Amino acid sequence: MSAIPSRIELWERSMASLSDSVFLDLLKNFIGKVPTPFHRPQLVKQLTTLFSSEDFITRVEVSLSESDCRLLTGCAILGCATQDELCSLLIDEYPYAAIQQNVVNLEERLLLVPDPESIGSRPSLMLNPLLMQRLLSKSLAIGHLLGFPAEGDSPLSWHADKRIVRALASLHMHASLGNLERSERLLASRHAKSIFGAEDARSVERLLLYNRLLFVSDIVVPNGKNVRVSTERLQMVLNEDEKSLGRRLFSTLLQHIHPQDRQRYEREVQIFYETFHQLLAYAWEDDPLVLKKICTIASHRSALAIGNMDEFIRLLRVTGVWKHGRDGDAEDSAVTLRPTLDSDLTISFTGDVQPVGNKDILHCISVVRKVDVVTSYEISKPTILRAFDLGLSASHILAYLEGLTHTTPASLNDLIRHWEAEFGAITIYDGILVKTDERLGRIIKVLPAVQSHIIRIIEDTLFLMARSTEQQWREILGATGVLILPSSISEHTFPQSSQPPSVTLDTPQPPIRELRMLLGDLGAQTKMLQTEQGDRLQRELRSLIDAKRLQKAQKEELVARLERKLILTASQIDATVGRTQTLEASGFDFQGKLNLCKAAVNSSVDLLELHMLEPDGGTHVLLTEVKEFIRDSKEAAIRVRVLPNGEERVILIDKVFRVRKLRRSIFFQA
């Protein structure tokens, strides 16, 4: 494993990735005009010294705006990000052109710099390594992206309900819901309202998600037109903590909205959920914009693309149960009704039931009747017979009921044992019939290691062996002198049971550990912007500019750079720096607009901000790449690609009120 580069090494590599022209333009702003020939490593050291100066760092901090902090926080959480990825975090709150130019401004100020690891493949930005720890600890907070809590607010958590899993398993066992399609139809039409109290579409959709979880986790396995329920798989899921069950539910939702190869994307889904879960702890309200930011970050950090993010967020809000921390505390302190067994053989309780002797078999011995504030299950002869069919004995069932309710009527004891006697009138074995010669038959009868694998000795040379442990008893028999046992004679090939995807993340993956550390540095509390100090600094620098004897154009240029926060110290007030003001043309300056449009055709560095007139007199703004200039005898037009959606349009220049020429990026070209 390669060593993690130091912050200075990372900074130097980032600066080394810049072209000479870009590097010298940046130096002119921060250090002044550089005579040629120049010694680049020495100049980088001068920049390093400047960005390590306590006075300069303080000036950087007071110059930060709210949008600066939001973008820098987003970049910190993403780790490194392209311009488009950064802009996507705020695209629902600001005009795209404003966000994109804010990112460019942060590049100009060297608060965002190129990530040297991404050069040439996926050009990305990262926080200035020299400033990162200071910004994280003093200026940036997760609240800049997800909102700061008000007094008394508690974070959200994504709640998974084991009661629904158990109840649905009970219905599949005792009510024959059938395959996924049929069970969804029956749940929506018959059971959703009567059992689960689901009257609205949101509650029904959530119930169907839990039902899909049973199929995805191979708890309910299709078997022709019917299904079989794996009690072992179900027990494992019911033994999981709420977070692990939530991960299963989340994985099921991801697969529903964006089907993937489960084995191939298992790690990505795990990282996605862990990232989502950690960030959700800093969210304070069920806001779709906040959830979209969290999922966008999780998608980036896990490299798991979500095909339709808006639909995913909709389903997430529909199927998720958002629980505030203080609400959970209230639930824990509420009076609960422990499981009681009524005379009509109904078991009622509030909350959830705990396993008895590490076993949870309530769904095996009874059918669910209600899941609400009070949950109830009903024991009947068919449910007990089904439990016997699953391999449970009367002793197991009675011991469970005694441990669950602490009281079992003698009449129920007698009834269950009577049903067991009826059930035992016919025995159907599922095993493998093994026929041997007399010598080997005698050996099998007395061989201790094989006795636990024999279901029944039919004759001296006929043995019914367990199918589930076939490999083990084959090895035991092979050791007796039969070197290779023959294959089973059968018309059918029994498929191996598929293993459901594991959703337990025993050891945190590196992206998750890094995020935990980063969130610890960022914190959730408000870090006040020092706007008063920033305003005072601006006034001081403006006074120094006004005091200089400069030509009008030079002074306008300095003021423009000051407004863009490119000037933070008196030494940066230098009239020799070239013109950097935004070029624009508007109103009746048709020729100016024409010239800007022509100059931007197929440019790798320039974008045009077009202010379009509306019929009601208003305007709307488009950020565009110009692909073609079109001119005929009557009018001129441009064919553009509108950012960020990529829509192509042909726009008459006469319809454009204002044209502004903007830079795509300081560091990267298209």
Image: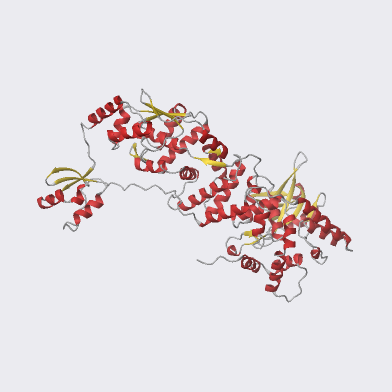
Counting the numbered discs, the total is 0
On screen, residue 252 versus residue 404, left or right, reads right
Query: Residue 398's x, y, as percent?
Result: 31, 32
Name the residue located 69 percent from the left edge and 70 percent from the top edge: 44
From this viewpoint, which residue is outermost toward the bottom? 37
Residue 122 to residue 364: above or below: below
Residue 302 to residue 40: above or below: above
Would you say residue 623 is visible in this rendering? no
Name the residue located 85 percent from the left edge and 60 percent from the top edge: 545
On screen, residue 365 versus residue 611, left or right, reads left
Query: Residue 288's x, y, as percent?
Result: 60, 41
Would you say residue 214 is visible in this rendering? yes
Query: Residue 344's x, y, as percent?
Result: 36, 23
From this viewpoint, which residue is outermost toward the top? 343
Instruction: Name the one closer to the observer, 619 or 19.
Output: 19
Scheme of image coloration: secondary structure
Instruction: Name the one closer to the observer, 35 or 31.
Output: 31
